[in-house]
Amino acid sequence: MSSTHTDCGCTPAALPLTVKDFRSNLKPIWCPGCGDYGVVTALYRALINIGRPPHEIAFVSGIGCSSRIPGYTTAYGFNTVHGRALPIAQGIKMANPDLLVLVAGGDGDGFSIGGGHVPHAIRRNLDLTYIVMDNHIYGLTKGQLSPTTPRGSKTPTSAYGSIEEPVNPLLYVLAYGAGFVAQGVPADMEGLSKMIEEAIRYPGFSFVNIQSPCVTFGDPEDQMKVQKTRMRKLAAEGHDPANRLRAMDLAQGYGTELYTGVFYRNPNPPPTYDQQIRERQEVLQPKPVAA
Ligand SMILES: Cc1ncc(C[n+]2csc(CCOP(=O)(O)OP(=O)(O)O)c2C)c(N)n1
Ligand code: SF4
Ligand SMILES: [Mg+2]
């Protein structure tokens, strides 16, 4: 890390952080052109603006190409088990609420095997940021059908075209009450890094769905070049992110429209789980016995 004290290893807030502080020595092994490169770059930029040094950040993922991401950062990283990033992240946050806890993974990791954990992380409302790299495919295991694969797509496990209705990750998390919901694309680096920063700053569970193209097994219509022509920024459409019902309405466009930006930000964030536990611990603290 470039801007740390060599003696104590801490990063004084006065020194500005740079990409070098967050990029690890590990060289990514993603395929050349994979959208996940853009995601990690956007994340570095967001973290620089957040200003917390890497040793104050825990980054938890599941298993998949996308779940390699913590290893490419200098934060404390835990590449856990397929579909189990959220429960582990919740445990980490409970054990050390002062840590900034980031969670990441793929569409398969989050909405197939791990789909049952999402509602509970949302309703508990721990202060976590969950980033899903949604490439509509199981990338790591060579291109099988994922929960967000569009109907009709041909993959090794849907040779005649998928006959399944895909999960809509945006509607899913909105329906369960997530306080912050956004969608980005690596093709819009500035917009993506800003929304990740905003998600981290939101006090409670925040979700960012990133349409991150898989160049090896993904649909040609999902690639960055096409995204640039298809993306529609919600801010430019005049969307008010405080309007949850409108956010749900727009989220229904998942799969047909490529909206980017903040769908929903709760204007009155409720207390987080971690906050409530702290308050309860204070109340239940044994009182000193009067002499
Ligand atoms: C319990 C378990 N089941 C299945 C697997 C095999 N597996 C590894 S990654 C993966 C899917 C990856 O897809 P996704 O989460 O969308 O991530 P991507 O590779 O597309 O980024 C599967 C099925 C596993 N590792 N562990
Ligand atoms: S297989 Fe797809 S998701 Fe995995 S690294 Fe390659 S391009 Fe990225
Ligand atoms: Mg995937």
Image (cartoon, rainbow, N blue to C red):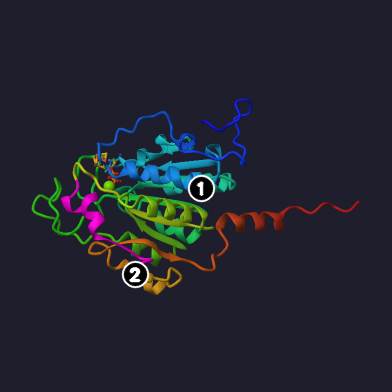
Q: Which residue lies furthest to the left in this view?
A: 160
Say if residue 191 shows up in the picture.
yes
- Assign ligand 1 to one image quadrant: top left
Name the residue type under label 2.
Answer: Glu
Q: Name the residue under label 1.
A: 49
Q: In this view, does 67 lie above or below 225?
A: above
* Residue located at (55% from left, 33% from top): 3
User: Closer to the N terminus: mark 1 or mark 2?
Assistant: 1
Percent coordinates x, y for residue 95 in the rendering: 57, 44
Start and end of the magenta stretch?
A: 218-237
Task: Give the residue type at disc 1.
Answer: Asn
Nearest to the observer: residue 265 or residue 288: 265
Q: Which mark is residue 141?
A: none
Instruction: Indicate left or right for 156 with 91 as reference.
Output: left
Magenta residue check for 219: yes
Q: Quadrant of residue 269?
A: bottom right
Q: Mark 2 points at which residue?
A: 237
Q: Determine the residue positioned at 10% across, 49% down.
A: 159
- Give coordinates of residue 25: x percent, y percent: 42, 28
